[in-house]
Image (tube, grey):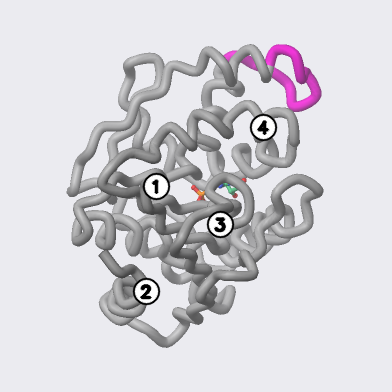
């Protein structure tokens, strides 16, 4: 049984940062499932495939030429779509918004399931996203759900954007964060919610190190 630690939560909560550090400490593999949804959304928009064209979307999902390469400097992973590095393009709010819209389609989620489960390799996997603990790795022995108030998450998101040289302002970012969460939490298929077994950590007043310490305390290896 290959162990999995799932880290779910809303946007801007710091899942990616925590997942990256914990995966390094444990020397486990890392899955940034949001990057799969973002890359898919980017590929679909480049090909002008519309949200309601299920057949073409599913064709694209099964042929998506997507590759991750580990890069500790870039929050863990560099992403290649059709052999072109798209890591920065993936991180924009525009791509996130698109991803959140495509992520509502149940058949599409279904077809991206195995691609995500294939990351489960020895000695273990840290997987971050929205439905890691509830759907993709339902049997994971370790589950965490991170929360933080929307203002704090908007601040973190903005800081991250600025660090990457992407412009943005707080009120706009707050609105985007709230809209995206509402869409992710209210959708029919695999909505954002904590698994019953998940340890819920409110990170609003915690440092990254404090969150990492709590998550590491859960995992016994
Ligand atoms: O984690 P992120 O911000 O990179 O995710 C971008 C969008 O992708 C998110 O708003 C909803 C979707 N997503 C999802 O539906 N399920 C996941 N496991 C991960 C992301």
Counting residues from the N terminus, which is met first, the one under dot 2 or under dot 1?
1
Residue 161 figure quarter: bottom left
Task: State the image coordinates of residue 151 (x, y, percent, origin top left).
Answer: 55, 76
- Was residue 49 drawn as part of the magenta stretch in this picture? yes
- Element carrying mark 4: helix
Which residue is under mark 1? 1
Counting residues from the N terminus, which is met first, the one under dot 3 or under dot 1?
1
**How far is disc 3 from disc 4 in space, using C-alphas?**
15 Å
Which residue is under mark 2? 218
Magenta segment, which residues?
47-56
Quarter holding the C terminus is bottom left
Which residue is under mark 4? 110
Residue 190 visible? The answer is yes
Hey, which residue is sitting farthest front in the picture? 1
Closest to the camera, between mark 3 and mark 1, is 1
Left or right, 66 with reference to 23: right
Counting residues from the N terminus, which is met first, the one under dot 3 or under dot 2?
3
Within-10-Å neighbours for mark 1: few <14, some 14–19, many 20+: few
Left or right, 79 with reference to 205: left
Residue 15 figure quarter: bottom left
Residue 175 figure quarter: bottom right
Identify the residue at horizontal 48%, vertical 79% (top origin): 201
What main secondary structure does the magenta stretch of the protein show?
A: loop
**How far is disc 2 from disc 4 in space, using C-alphas?**
29 Å
Identify the residue at horizontal 57%, vertical 78% (top origin): 149
Tell me whether the residue at label 4 lies in contact with that at label 1, contact meaning CB atoms closer than 8 angstroms: no
Which residue is under mark 3? 133
**How far is disc 4 from disc 1 in space, using C-alphas?**
23 Å
Task: State the image coordinates of residue 70 (x, y, percent, origin top left).
Answer: 22, 38
Q: How many marks?
A: 4
């Amino acid at each position: 049984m290959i162990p999995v630690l799932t880290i779910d939560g809303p946007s801007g909560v710091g899942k990616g940062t925590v997942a990256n550090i914990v995966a390094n400490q444990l020397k486990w593999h890392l899955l940034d499932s949001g990057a799969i949804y973002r890359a898919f959304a980017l590929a679909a928009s480049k090909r002008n495939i519309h949200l309601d064209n299920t057949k073409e979307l599913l064709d694209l999902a099964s042929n998506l030429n997507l590759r991750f390469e580990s890069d500790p400097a870039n929050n863990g992973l560099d992403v290649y779509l059709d052999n072109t590095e798209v890591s920065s393009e993936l991180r924009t709010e525009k791509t996130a918004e698109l991803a959140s819209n495509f992520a509502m389609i149940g058949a599409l989620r279904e077809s991206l399931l195995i691609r995500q489960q294939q990351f489960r390799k020895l000695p273990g996997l840290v997987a971050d996203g929205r439905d890691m603990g509830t759907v993709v790795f339902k049997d994971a022995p370790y589950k965490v759900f991170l929360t933080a108030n929307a203002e704090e998450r908007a601040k973190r998101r903005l800081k991250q954007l600025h660090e990457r040289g992407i412009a943005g302002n707080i009120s706009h970012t707050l609105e985007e964060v709230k809209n995206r969460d509402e869409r992710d939490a209210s959708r029919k298929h695999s909505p954002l919610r904590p698994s019953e077994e998940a340890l819920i950590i409110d990170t609003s007043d915690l440092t990254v190190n404090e969150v990492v310490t709590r998550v590491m305390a859960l995992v016994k290896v």
